[in-house]
């Protein structure tokens, strides 16, 4: 998501960081690269113009030019202006009354029907009883699709294939909600391949006669500036309450996400980040700005982990850690929990400092490497899993033969596990603040993103690395990359 924009902005900020001393001249050159990165991402020209005006006003000033680390301060300004550009956001659905109505609209192919199902799932998880109403009578397949989604989610769906008027279907759906005891009604309305008067008139009739509590427009994030134009047109006719942007897991350049609030005044409420029905997230401007600047999104990752991880299994592991126990079996169970969060590359991109490394390791396969680790662990005896010190040369050869790997790969797993086991044991019984402090110490060498100490400035976590420490961390990082590439060539 936003990979091209992230790469270009990172390059622009690195150009500033590489200057021995920032002057007004080279500052403007660096900001020119920022402007170019935004335009190439299909951000609205007027939005870029106002954005750069605000950034330049703050960046080209005596306070920044004479600051201790001016390049990092510029990164902080860009970050804050990105947050201002996309926010603020109110994630409340404002569900008032006994059975409030949510109206979904959008062009055909934007993912509207699937998003209706995702929103229904989100509401069900929050303790609501939604009813989905199939009011897209232009496309019979949309009715079938909504029924299939309803069966998968165990959410009731109302439809009337004989009726030709969507307003009648929506009104009947409201009555059906009372009958089945639903407390939220979601209307999946018709879409077109383009905006026309017939479509808008139909949606206006539904809006007037059903009085939905919220009207959401679903737009395809991959269409770039066209998505903003669509949102603007729909908003002028329907007074939208929010936008749900889909397909941000694909090759979205980012222009729509950065432009839609400024151009239309309508906030992005949610984003679709995958095809699965759980891939709908609240939109957080600050987290998105962090992703765009290559800082990851650790908060979203933690929230996802809390929702996906097996609580009972995690409780058992906490008890074992409290007793000072952490074996390779525990390590494997934790890795399996991680695989439930989604593709490894997507997870790693959300970890601060890992985005840039992923670009350099684009020939690696994290999923394949993880299952190779599982194979090595499964080839060990229970005693070896409990105490890796037992694994001598002959045992390494036996384990490697059983897992179909080289003996040195067994040794590398053991070397990777031992410091991790010490870290996990040291975390036992500690609160979240203390755990994050330990985690920050371990990941410090990874923090080589162009925004430098931005996350530390904003969150106050840890001390700033010295120039010497940064150089050491950079050498270690490059050494790790070379080692991984060498392993890949051997395979």
Image: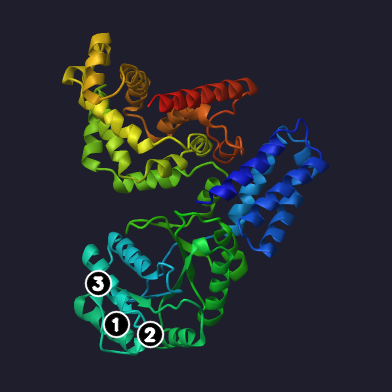
**Which residue is at 27% across, 66% downward?**
149
Q: Position of residue 58 (x, y in %)?
A: 74, 49
Q: Mark 1 touching mark 2, by CB under 8 A? A: yes
Give whichever of 181, 386 is nearer the camera. 386
Is residue 104 at least partly visible in the picture?
yes
User: SS class of the residue under badge 3?
Assistant: helix
N-terminal-most mark, 1 or 2: 1
Judging by the rendered image, the residue that carries numbered circle 3 is: 147
Judging by the rendered image, the residue that carries numbered circle 1 is: 174
Q: Position of residue 287 (x, y in %)?
A: 51, 49
- Disc 2: CA contacts within 10 A as few (<14), some (14-19) or many (>=20): some
**Which residue is at 56% across, 39% downward?**
455
Left/right placement of residue 380 relative to residue 284 reads: left
Disc marking residue 210: 2
Left/right placement of residue 49 relative to residue 334 reads: right
Left/right placement of residue 66 relative to residue 84 reads: right
Q: Residue furthest left?
A: 382
| Quarter assignment of residue 50 | bottom right
Inter-mark Cα distance, 3 to 1:
17 Å
Reply above or below: 193 against 63: below
**Which residue is at 59% across, 70% downward?**
264
């Amino acid at each position: 998501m936003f990979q091209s924009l992230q790469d270009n902005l990172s390059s622009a900020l690195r150009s500033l960081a590489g200057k021995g001393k920032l002057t007004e001249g080279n500052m403007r050159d660096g900001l020119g690269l920022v402007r170019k990165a935004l335009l190439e991402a299909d951000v609205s020209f007027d939005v870029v113009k106002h954005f750069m005006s605000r950034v330049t006003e703050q960046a080209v000033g005596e306070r920044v030019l004479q600051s201790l680390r001016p390049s990092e301060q510029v990164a902080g300004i860009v970050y804050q202006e990105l947050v201002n550009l996309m926010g603020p956001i109110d994630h409340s659905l404002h569900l008032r009354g006994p059975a409030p109505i949510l109206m979904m609209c959008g062009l055909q192919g934007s993912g509207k029907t699937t998003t209706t199902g995702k929103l229904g799932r989100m509401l069900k998880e929050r303790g609501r009883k939604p009813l989905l109403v199939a009011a897209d009578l232009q496309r019979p397949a949309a009715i079938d699709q909504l029924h299939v989604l309803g069966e998968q989610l165990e959410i009731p769906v109302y439809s009337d294939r004989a009726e030709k008027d969507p307003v009648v279907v929506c009104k009947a759906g409201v009555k059906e909600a009372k009958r089945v005891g639903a407390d939220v009604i979601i209307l999946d309305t018709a879409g077109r391949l383009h905006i026309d008067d017939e479509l808008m008139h139909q949606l206006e009739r539904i809006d007037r006669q059903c009085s939905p509590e919220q009207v959401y427009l679903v737009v395809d994030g991959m269409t770039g500036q066209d998505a903003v134009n669509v949102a603007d047109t729909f908003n002028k006719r329907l007074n939208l309450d929010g936008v749900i942007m889909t397909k941000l897991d694909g090759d979205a350049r980012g222009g729509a996400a950065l432009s839609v609030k400024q151009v239309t005044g309508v906030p992005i409420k949610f984003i679709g980040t995958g095809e699965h029905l759980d891939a709908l997230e609240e939109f957080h401007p600050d987290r998105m700005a962090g992703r765009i600047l290559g800082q990851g999104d650790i908060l979203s990752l933690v929230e996802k982990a809390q929702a996906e991880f097996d609580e009972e299994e995690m409780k058992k592991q906490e008890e074992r850690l409290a007793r000072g126990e952490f074996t390779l079996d525990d390590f494997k169970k934790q890795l399996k929990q991680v695989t439930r969060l989604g593709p490894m590359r997507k997870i790693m991109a959300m970890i601060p400092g890992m985005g840039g490394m992923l670009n350099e390791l684009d020939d690696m396969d994290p999923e394949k490497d993880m299952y190779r680790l599982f194979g090595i662990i499964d080839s060990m005896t229970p005693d070896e899993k409990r105490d890796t010190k037992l694994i001598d040369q002959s045992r390494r050869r036996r384990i490697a033969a059983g897992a179909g790997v080289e003996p040195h790969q067994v040794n590398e797993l053991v070397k990777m596990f031992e410091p991790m086991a010490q870290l996990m044991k040291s975390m036992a019984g500690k609160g979240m603040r203390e755990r994050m402090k330990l985690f920050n110490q371990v990941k410090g060498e990874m923090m080589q993103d162009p925004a430098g100490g931005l996350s530390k400035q904003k969150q106050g976590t840890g001390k700033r690395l010295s120039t010497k420490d940064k150089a050491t961390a950079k050498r270690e990082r490059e050494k790790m990359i070379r080692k991984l590439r060498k392993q890949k060539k051997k395979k």
